[in-house]
Image: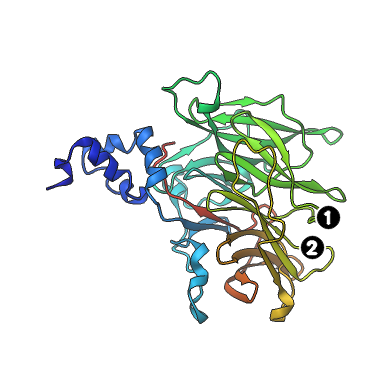
């Protein structure tokens, strides 16, 4: 019996359990599958049941590269076999934008989609690596070099006036930018709705005087670590459903000096933050993790003790500096950290990726080259999906 001989409802249930990446390669087999893989109810079911294999990506040297697998499991290899091999630059923008090479300065992942801004913020493109679909986002007026972005979605089922036939997720882009003059510089916000294809100004948002970078998406909302020197740090959440900022706590008295702290998502359920007291020249790295994060939570519930604590003096090393991103394997208490440092009076930068644990340190990647404060290396875990742009 062929799968095409099965009742359509049974065929639907079987295909919903196939990883999205495999389905994307099979959509041209027949018209029925082509239509099915674009049905929003099927895409939601596949996201829940498809068990797509997570992949890890890195932004480095103005390009996006893939490792082809999830770095969460890299510690399972032994001895000198631990290493990272990049499968090559993902040059998806070259054909669509008709350029020989496109330099990417920022990326942001949400719901299987990647938001990319090019060097000096000349272009903004959203991309689904699984389906290969791309879409360039034109500015309302113009983009600026200092712009930062976040990608998320509104949960329409929680809106009081949403209809049962409307899409449950409405993907949006939040843009944060400076405007004004030298005497009066302000921070403003705009929102782009992918369903309507238009920008609108958000006049009701509080004007925070800091441009945020390296946020993470969890259940459609974006989270950053935010704060001021001398006042400590906290977690800032942007709720894409209510379109409001929400201030949340970090572990009490754990971040007294830092101006920033990397934040990461653990298995699409929790948040984690990395603490390294640079000002105190500490050699101890601590990683904290929350309980499962729910949209209804009014604050974050952190573990009473750090999940992972690494003292670099054990390995005869100084502490990591400028950790820009990390991935945490909570179960095995191992983290993959990406950091950047400068040499030769800031002419060259060193990008390193290492695996750290309570009794383990292994450098798995090192690269020396030109760098920029607008192009910090960034590790992220990508979950393939059939979400259409």
Residue in front for this viewpoint, 256 or 142: 256
Q: Which mark is residue 256?
A: 1
Quarter of the image for residue 316 reads: bottom right
Tell me if 241 is positioned left or right of 9 in this view. Answer: right
For the point 37% across and 43% down, the residue is 46
132 lies above or below 169: below
Assess whether mark 2 and mark 1 are in contact (beta carbons under 8 angstroms): yes
Residue 347 seen in the current view: no
Give residue 159's position: percent from left, percent from top. Answer: 55, 24
Q: Which mark is residue 277?
A: 2
For the point 51% across and 57% down, the residue is 57
Residue in front for this viewpoint, 279 or 134: 279
For the point 46% across and 50% down, the residue is 383
Residue 301 seen in the current view: yes
Badge 2 local density, few (<14 within 10 Å), some, or many (20+)? many
Helix, strand or loop for disc 2: loop
Residue in front for this viewpoint, 185 or 283: 283
Q: How many marks?
A: 2
Tell me if 10 is positioned left or right of 67 in this view. Answer: left
Helix, strand or loop for disc 1: loop
The quadrant of the rendering that contains the C terminus is: top left
Quarter of the image for residue 206 reads: top right
Give residue 279's position: percent from left, percent from top. Answer: 84, 63
Give residue 100's position: percent from left, percent from top. Answer: 47, 52
Residue situated furthest front in the rendering: 304
Residue in front for this viewpoint, 190 or 62: 190
CA gap between label 1 and label 2 equals 8 Å
Which comes sooner in the sequence, label 1 or label 2?
Answer: 1
Quarter of the image for residue 219 reads: top right
145 lies above or below 305: above
């Amino acid at each position: 019996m062929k799968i095409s001989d099965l009742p359509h409802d049974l065929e639907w249930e079987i295909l919903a359990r196939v990883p999205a990446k495999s389905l994307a390669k099979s959509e041209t087999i027949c018209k029925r599958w082509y239509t099915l893989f674009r049905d929003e109810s099927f895409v939601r079911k596949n996201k829940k049941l498809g068990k797509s294999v997570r992949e890890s990506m890195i932004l480095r040297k103005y390009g996006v590269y893939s490792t082809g697998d999830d770095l969460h499991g890299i510690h399972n290899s032994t001895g000198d076999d631990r290493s990272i091999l990049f499968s090559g630059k993902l040059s998806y923008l070259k054909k669509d934008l008709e350029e020989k090479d496109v330099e990417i300065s920022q990326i942001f992942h949400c719901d299987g989609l990647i938001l990319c801004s090019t060097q000096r913020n000349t272009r903004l493109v959203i991309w689904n690596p699984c389906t290969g679909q791309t879409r360039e986002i034109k500015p309302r007026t113009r983009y600026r070099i200092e712009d930062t972005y976040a990608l998320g979605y509104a949960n329409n089922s929680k809106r009081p006036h949403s209809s049962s036939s409307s899409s449950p997720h409405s993907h949006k882009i939040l843009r944060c930018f400076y405007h004004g003059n030298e005497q009066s510089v302000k921070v403003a916000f705009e929102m782009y709705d992918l369903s309507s294809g238009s920008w609108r100004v958000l006049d009701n948002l509080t004007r925070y005087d800091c441009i945020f970078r390296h946020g993470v998406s969890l259940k459609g909302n974006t989270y950053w670590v935010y704060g001021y020197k001398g006042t400590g740090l906290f977690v800032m959440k942007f709720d894409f459903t209510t379109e409001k900022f929400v201030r949340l706590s970090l572990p009490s008295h754990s971040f007294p000096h830092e101006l920033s702290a990397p934040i990461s998502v653990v298995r699409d359920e929790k948040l984690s933050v990395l603490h390294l007291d640079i000002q105190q020249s500490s050699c101890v790295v601590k990683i904290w993790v929350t309980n499962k994060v729910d949209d209804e939570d009014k604050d974050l519930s952190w573990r009473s003790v750090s999940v992972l604590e690494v003292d670099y003096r054990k390995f005869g090393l100084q502490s990591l500096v400028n950790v820009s991103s990390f991935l945490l394997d909570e179960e095995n208490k191992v983290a993959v950290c990406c950091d950047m440092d400068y040499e030769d009076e800031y002419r060259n930068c060193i990008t390193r990726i290492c695996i750290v644990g309570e009794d383990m340190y292994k450098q798995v990647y090192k690269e020396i080259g030109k760098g920029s404060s607008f192009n910090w290396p960034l590790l992220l875990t990508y979950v393939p999906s059939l979400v259409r742009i």
